[in-house]
Image (cartoon, rainbow, N blue to C red):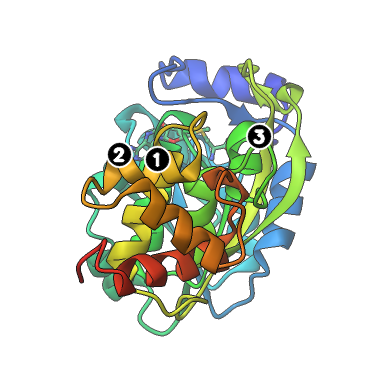
Amino acid sequence: MNLYNMQDIKPLLARHGFHFSKSLGQNFLIASWVPEETVAAANLDERSGVLEIGPGIGALTRPLAQAAGKVVSVELDRTLLPVLRETLAGCANTRVIHGDILKTDLAVLVDEHFADLRPVVVANLPYNITTPVLTHLVDSGLFERITVMVQKEVALRITASAGSSHYGAFSVYAAYYTEPTFCFDVPPDCFVPRPKVDSAVITLAVRKTPPVSTDPVAIFQVIKAAFAQRRKTLVNCLCSAFPGASKEMLAGILIGLGHDSRIRGETLDLQAFAQLTDGLLDAGIIRR
Ligand code: SAM
């Protein structure tokens, strides 16, 4: 069965009484080059244990199974399970689990399924839960590489550099825990139904240790404060977040670090946020 051909997909879905759900972010791939390039970007081999989120009808699962040692796919929509039994019948190294990825105990899953394999994630994500899924995956510390299709806007935000229009708190979070790469664009006509937004594939190479050595709780307090009010200067943002500090004190710390006192938070990269955090800790403005 050709999972990229509507003439094969339509009768398959009709036979199983499947209807697309918008709230589950169900836009299925119908362009074979997209799974092929996604698998290539994921850099898989027979030692890879792939966690896939939302297999749909298996358009990405099948090429993943060819490239990896094992694929475990977590699918929330129960009505897709009999479809997947049919489409993945020839793929002995796949396993479908019915469940919500956000409620899945990832450590247990990895332990049970990927004992002798290198755990990685490859998925065409349901876009409405992109941020909680990515933080769930990254915070788990279990996966060395995460290759995902997301809304293009989100891909640009995650991979943005300091000072660019897409740069925000999530860009700094991504840079702290991972090395993000923008891989390629995916236009709406690659899916059924066609989404209203453009898509893109990114990879996140998860770091073993953060690239900066400042206090891990404090730096995220500073990042959150810096992006809380984008139109304000960094001094004003920090003043609102840390009321014990005067504007003069904060401006002095910024100048001491070689910045203009009127800069905005979005001009600072991860290193600069780490230096600022150390400055605020040393001055007693943030307590450890
Ligand atoms: N991988 C398929 C493809 O590329 O054609 C389908 C991708 S579709 C964008 C997202 C898939 O995630 C759907 O199959 C949907 O049912 C599933 N899904 C949505 N929310 C989920 C959740 N919380 N946990 C697991 N799967 C979910």
Between marks 3 and 2 in the image, the one whose residue lies nearer the viewer: 2
The image shows residue 202 at horizontal and vertical percentages of 65, 51
Give the numbered dot on residue 107.
Answer: none
Q: Nearest the camera: 188 or 65?
A: 188
Dot 2: what SS? helix
Dot 3: what SS? helix
Disc 2: which residue? 240
Between marks 3 and 1 in the image, the one whose residue lies nearer the viewer: 1
Disc 3: which residue? 152
Dot 1: what SS? helix
State if disc 1 and disc 2 touch (CB < 8 Å): yes
Left or right: 248 in relation to 122: left
Q: Nearest the camera: 103 or 74?
A: 103
Q: Quadrant of ligand 1?
A: top left
* Mark 3 and mark 1: Cα distance apart in space: 29 Å
The image shows residue 143 at horizontal and vertical percentages of 44, 69
Q: Nearest the camera: 70 or 147?
A: 147
Considering only vertical position in the picture, is 47 above or below 105? below
Q: Quadrant of residue 138?
A: bottom left
Residue that appears at 38% across and 19% down: 23
Nearest to N terminus: mark 3 or mark 1: 3
Residue that appears at 76% across and 39% down: 185
The image shows residue 81 at horizontal and vertical percentages of 36, 37
Give the numbered dot on residue 237.
Answer: 1
Residue type pointed to by label 3: Lys
For label 3, the crowd category at 10 Å Cα-Cα, with few meaning under 14, some 14 to 19 and many 20 or more, is many
Left or right: 34 in relation to 73: right
Q: Nearest the camera: 73 or 242?
A: 242
Quarter holding the N terminus is top right
Q: Quadrant of residue 142?
A: bottom left
Residue type pointed to by label 1: Cys
Nearest to N terminus: mark 3 or mark 2: 3
